[in-house]
């Protein structure tokens, strides 16, 4: 794998090669320990996986029920009216339709954030106004300053991710409700709550109920991340019935697959295990942050997601650390140099069980400090041309925001 790791990352359409590609490259049928993809490691339970495996033939042989049937079951579990919900083949499908149907000319989004909120509207020719989050303030989003930015730019759609990806920054519900009220004249406000299930900063952090009462607000929720099933591709949005119906009417009748249906109908009997899995992730987050914070020169930012955003020590470069962790320690991490508003000094590390975290910390100690703890790895040579640096990001943000 060592000889091919660079080409794997350079040829990947996403930020990292798929686990399938890495497993094939490894040659032993096993993938690396995954600190890259933000997935719940405790759900589904082993018993649930065994049940799905026993029914695999039927699941993959037959058509699923219609999206309306699957949505109705999900809404029963969530206690939401089906007319206010649209389910998609992953949140990315819903982001695509939101862009095509509801973003006419411009969209504002804080950066760094989930890449589809910047890339999708740019791909369809919209103006994307990027509001840079400041490292000096721990990447915290100042909603008042963001609102002033939107007004100054004349932006028509505003996006807020809560918690934000990749830093895990959290905004309290009352502040978001005030922001939605202040933006009532915009074409659309999107609150992306894809990682909110992992938050514990307040008892009821979601703005779903408030969104259903407003004509221009959509809340986006993920299922794959929460349920540990990225491969199934399912998520949903909540809005007032007219707005949700507009998106729902454009979705294919069978946009949800049979695995998604099977999992949704399993949840009624496994709510307790799901709640326990979220609690364990939250406990693991605290433990993992503590262990990483003990590494010299490594900065760990507060997070309410199931991941931690870390700044590497001075002199360390993310692509070098990423490649060495993978080739020498079979650990996959998310290097954030290609994320707008970030640079290769930053990694996003998914929260995992303690046994995996010990392996990560040991690998970082060897890669970052070697035999001389505290001496960071050197900057890469000129041949490492696939790293995105701060200067390139600054140019892109400046050019996009300045072009109007």
Image (spheres, helix red, strand yellow):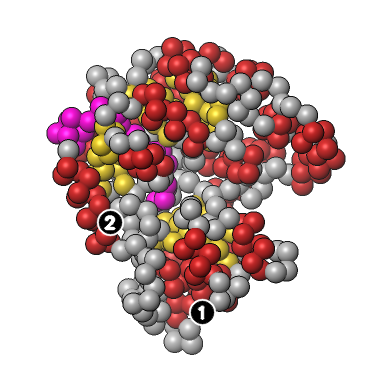
Q: Secondary structure at mark 1?
A: helix
Which residue position is annotated with label 2?
Answer: 393
Q: Is residue 218 above or below residue 387?
A: above
Q: Residue at x 54, y 70 (%)?
A: 5
Q: Which residues are magenta?
A: 149-169
Q: Residue at x 77, y 36 (%)?
A: 60
Where's the C terminus, which quadrant?
Answer: top left
- Is residue 277 visible in this depiction of the protein? no
Q: Residue at x 45, y 81 (%)?
A: 369
Residue 164 vs residue 295, the one in the foreground: 164
Q: Position of residue 317 (x, y in %)?
A: 38, 71
Residue 313 vs residue 278, the one in the foreground: 313
Q: Residue at x 62, y 59 (%)?
A: 21
Q: Quadrant of residue 380?
A: bottom left
Where's the N terminus, which quadrant?
Answer: bottom right
Q: Position of residue 101 (x, y in %)?
A: 39, 23
Asked whether, in this view, residue 48 is left or right of residue 388, the answer is right
Q: Which mark is residue 366?
A: 1
Q: Position of residue 363 (x, y in %)?
A: 54, 73
């Amino acid at each position: 794998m060592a000889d091919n790791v660079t080409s794997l990352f350079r040829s990947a359409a996403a930020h990292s090669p798929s686990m399938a590609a890495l497993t094939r490259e490894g040659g032993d049928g096993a993938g690396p320990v995954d600190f890259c993809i933000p997935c719940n490691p405790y759900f589904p339970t082993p018993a649930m996986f065994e049940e799905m495996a026993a029914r695999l033939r039927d699941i993959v042989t037959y058509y699923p029920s219609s999206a309306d049937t699957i949505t109705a079951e999900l809404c029963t579990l969530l206690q939401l009216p089906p007319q206010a919900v649209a389910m998609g083949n992953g949140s990315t499908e819903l982001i695509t339709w939101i862009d095509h149907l509801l973003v006419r000319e411009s969209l504002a989004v804080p950066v760094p954030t989930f890449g589809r909120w910047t890339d999708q509207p740019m791909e369809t020719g919209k103006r994307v106004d990027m509001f840079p989050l400041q490292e000096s303030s721990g990447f915290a989003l100042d909603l008042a300053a963001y609102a002033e930015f939107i007004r100054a730019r004349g932006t028509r759609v505003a996006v807020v991710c809560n918690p934000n990806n990749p830093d895990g920054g959290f905004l309290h519900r009352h502040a978001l409700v005030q922001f939605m009220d202040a933006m009532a004249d915009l074409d659309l406000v999107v609150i992306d709550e894809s990682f909110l299930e992992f938050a514990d900063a307040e008892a009821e952090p979601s703005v779903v109920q408030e969104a259903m009462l407003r004509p221009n607000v959509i809340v986006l929720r993920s299922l794959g991340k929460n349920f540990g099933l990225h491969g199934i591709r399912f998520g949903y949005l909540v809005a007032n019935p007219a707005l949700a119906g507009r998106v729902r009417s454009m979705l294919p009748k069978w946009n949800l697959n049979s695995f998604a249906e099977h999992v949704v109908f399993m949840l009624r009997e496994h709510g307790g295990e799901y709640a326990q899995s979220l609690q364990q992730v939250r406990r693991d987050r605290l433990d993992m942050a503590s262990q990483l914070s003990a590494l010299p020169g490594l900065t760990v930012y507060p997070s309410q997601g199931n991941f931690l955003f870390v700044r590497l020590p001075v002199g360390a470069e993310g692509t070098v650390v990423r490649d060495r962790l993978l080739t020498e320690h079979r650990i996959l991490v998310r290097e954030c140099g290609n994320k707008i508003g970030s640079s290769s000094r930053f990694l996003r590390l998914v929260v995992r069980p303690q046994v995996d975290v010990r392996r990560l910390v040991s690998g970082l100690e060897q890669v970052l400090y070697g035999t001389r703890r505290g001496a960071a790895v050197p900057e890469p040579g000129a041949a490492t041309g696939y790293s995105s640096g701060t200067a390139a990001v600054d140019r892109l943000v400046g050019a996009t925001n300045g072009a109007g």
